[in-house]
Amino acid sequence: MIHSQIIGYGHYLPEKILNNVDLKKFIDTSDEWIYTRTGIKQRHIVESSQLTSDLAIKAAEDALLSAKIESSLIDCIIVATTTPDNTFPSTATKVQNFFKIGNIPSFDLQAVCSGFIYSLQVADSLIKSGKFKNILIIGAETLSKIVDWTDRRTCVLFGDGAGSVILSATTEKRGVLSSKLYSDGSWHDSLYADGGPSLNQDVGKIRMNGQDIFKQAVNKLSESTQNALNECNLNISDVNWLVPHQANQRIIQSTAKKLGIDNNKTISTVEYHANTSAASIPLALSCSIKKGVIKKNDIVALCAIGGGLTWGSCILKL
Ligand code: UT7
């Protein structure tokens, strides 16, 4: 029986930091409002010349280093992103070209903030098919480029960054133990970009009904995580770490409470990274593993929700 385990983790954050006080210089907001409503203190922001592929490549280099494997061993690349460099071709092909890995499939996956969880399930299935051995998965975003910097309801929430993992075939029973993916397109208008190639030939800006999403998030994140636990016959008490999508500290805490897991077993990086969409989970994972917080053999539950709506959960044994 083939299983898929994560053998390397990496991340990259742009150097420039925009904190809540900086935001006050151009919108009517306060550090107090942002921090109490979201838990966010700061976000990393790219320079205008930096592209999503630049962030993706740096995170991938870091993951390859940690996995201690040559890039030539990678046999598929998946980039989860909502902010690709171009409408086409995919950002994944730019990553592939950088590493000069010839004749392998590379593609972008669009599931907004759930993009990393979706990619993990796709990569796990590809590995279990027996056709692939080492898949590079990257979540990378430059959301600052599609944020409306005059809309205080959304612009304070997002940041830029990238996280990456290398998923590899193994005969050991570890790695991806189960995953559950969902979508419900009837929520389209609650969180979307008001542009697109077919719609108006513009990339558009982020538009969100925050309260709609907030209400959906806690229920959907906790239900899908419970369903993923049921699928691999584990209980929440077996979970060492919950690594939820990093959108809002209140959503993170309420989800943990609903699932019945302590806050001190819940990873939160939202204070420092804000919401980096598809990058948020691999970023949080990589940071926590590099700090020695999450360790080998830990059972980790991942969960995310984003535009679509799309949502899902994944249970891992590291
Ligand atoms: O990754 C995708 C998933 N997205 C999410 O998970 C986001 C989910 N939603 C949320 O996190 C929250 O709904 C927000 C943080 C977006 C908003 O928090 P809220 O407690 O739902 O606030 P609200 O939208 O009800 O706004 C309350 C007040 C409003 O003023 P009035 O109408 O009551 O006078 C807003 O205009 O806060 C005002 N407000 C702000 N004030 C200062 C909204 N944004 C700001 C701001 N600074 N940045």
Image (cartoon, helix red, strand yellow):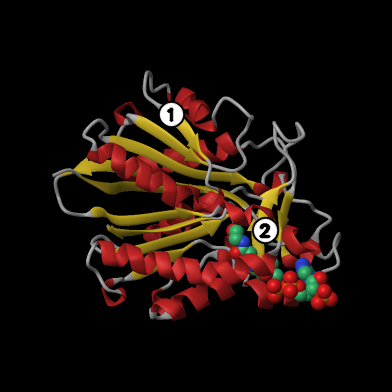
Whether the residue under disc 1 has CB within 8 Å of ligand 1: no
Of labels 1 and 2, the one closer to you:
2
Give the quarter of the image for residue 35: bottom right
Mark 2 = which residue? 190
Q: Residue at x 27, y 73 (%)?
A: 235
| Residue 96 percent across, percent down from the top left | 45, 26
* Quarter of the image with the C terminus in it: bottom left
Q: Position of residue 121 (x, y in %)?
A: 36, 47
Disc marking residue 106: 1
- Image-based side of 258 in relation to 23, left or right: left
Q: Can you say whether 132 is above or below 214 in the image?
A: above
Q: Circle 2 sits in a helix, a strand or a loop, which is it?
A: helix
Residue 161 vs 220, above or below: the answer is above
- CB of residue at label 2: within 8 Å of ligand 1? no
- Relative image position of residue 309 (x, y in whole percent): 56, 55
Q: Position of residue 77 (x, y in %)?
A: 41, 33
Residue at left 39%, top 75%? 265
Vertical position of residue 251 compared to residue 306: above or below: below
Q: Quadrant of the N terminus?
A: top left
Crowding at label 2, few (<14), some or many (≥20) Cα neighbours within 10 Å?
some
Q: Name the residue type under label 1.
A: Ser
Q: Is residue 276 visible?
A: no
Separation of disc 1 and disc 2 at Cα? 31 Å
Residue nearer the viewer, 138 or 67: 138
The answer to whether residue 26 is left or right of residue 122 is right
Report the front residue among 205 and 167.
Answer: 205
Task: Classify 10 Å Cα crowding around label 1: few (below 14), some (14-19), many (20 and above).
Answer: many
Instruction: Give the residue displayed 67% in from the left and 45% down from the top.
Output: 46
Ligand 1 placement by image quarter: bottom right
Query: Tag 2: residue type?
Result: Ser
